[in-house]
Image (tube, rainbow, N blue to C red):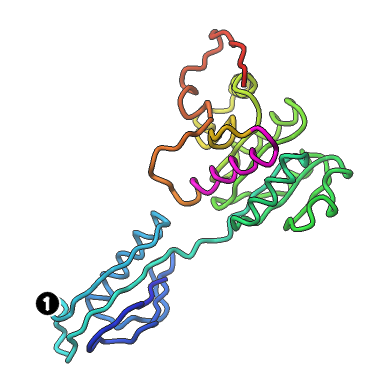
Amino acid sequence: MATIVSARGSIPSFKTAKMLVRDDGSIVGTIGGGCVEAEVWQASREVMESEKPRTLSFDLNQDPKYDTGLVCGGTLEVFVEPVLPPASLYIFGAGHVAINLCRVALNAGFDVSVIDDREAYASRERFPDAKEVIAEDFDQAMQKLEPSEASYIVITTRGHRDDMRVLRWAVQTRARYIGMIGSKRKTISIFRELTKEGIAAHLFDRVHAPVGLDIGAVTPEEIAVAITAELIAIRRNAERALPHMSWFKMHASEASETEPLKEDSH
């Protein structure tokens, strides 16, 4: 979405004028046409790719390429922002971390769905603000879900085997982000088991395990903040180096069937 946020002098449009650029390049609305609109269109395409807003400044007095023969000699600023689809977060497991993650992620703008095979845990009483609460066997629930490129998955089930079967499904979806709670030792063990089954190693490129940013989190409340911070960093395409705890980000290529598992204190 491109919006004229500042205008001085004579311009071929007006302040607050808007133009929407769709995925296919077509537009709705106008900010005045001509070279200005063409440059804003190109910038909009770039913003769609980066998902980061930009502000463009135009001086119609100084640059001859903006001379359209009309009596326009002003300056204007155009704010171009991405129109992102709602980010969906699927939390598998409904324990203490899930309760706190649901709260924090909701405040950060995620639509949260919680899935657990225990009705006593996956309930509206425990997750009153979640978009969806599913109390069903994990395999049955996963068959009904279709995560998109705007989806995020966090795995916090109560056991190794449940984590593994959810991760097996998750890496074969289109989800943008997959996180799994647990130690590095557990992560390596599950990775090896799944690759032995024939799941391609490159499918784990989106996996963050152990999940979250390394901020020294200990309590469920703190762990929820660390996970949500990582979700935001992925959603906003953070460019700076961040303290990801994920073993996959540095060591996945080093894992081999013959490499011994070392005890991990994490």
Q: Residue at x 74, y 48 (%)?
A: 114
Quarter residue 5 falls in = bottom left
Q: Is residue 128 left or right of residue 29?
A: right
Q: Residue at x 69, y 44 (%)?
A: 91
Viewer-proximal residue among 75 and 27: 75
Residue 38, x across and y down, in percent: 27, 72
Amino acid under disc 1: Gln
Q: Residue at x 31, y 86 (%)?
A: 13
Classify 10 Å Cα crowding around label 1: few (below 14), some (14-19), many (20 and above). Answer: few
Viewer-proximal residue among 225 and 23: 225
- Decide whether the magenta segment is chiefly helix, strand or loop: helix
Quarter residue 118 falls in = top right
Q: Residue at x 39, y 75 (%)?
A: 27
Q: Which residue is mark 1?
A: 62
Residue 242, x across and y down, in percent: 45, 37
Q: Is residue 261 left or right of residue 70?
A: right
Magenta segment boundaries in residue numbering: 218-233
Residue 256 position (above or below residue 235): above
Residue 263 position (above or below residue 62): above
Quarter residue 167 falls in = top right
Magenta-span inclusion, residue 231: yes
Viewer-proximal residue among 136 and 172: 136
Label 1 sits on a secondary structure element that is loop
- Name the image quarter holding the C terminus: top right
Residue 17, x across and y down, in percent: 38, 82
The mark tally for this picture is 1
Magenta-span inclusion, residue 219: yes
Residue 257 position (above or below residue 151): above
- Name the image quarter holding the N terminus: bottom left
Residue 126, x across and y down, in percent: 82, 50
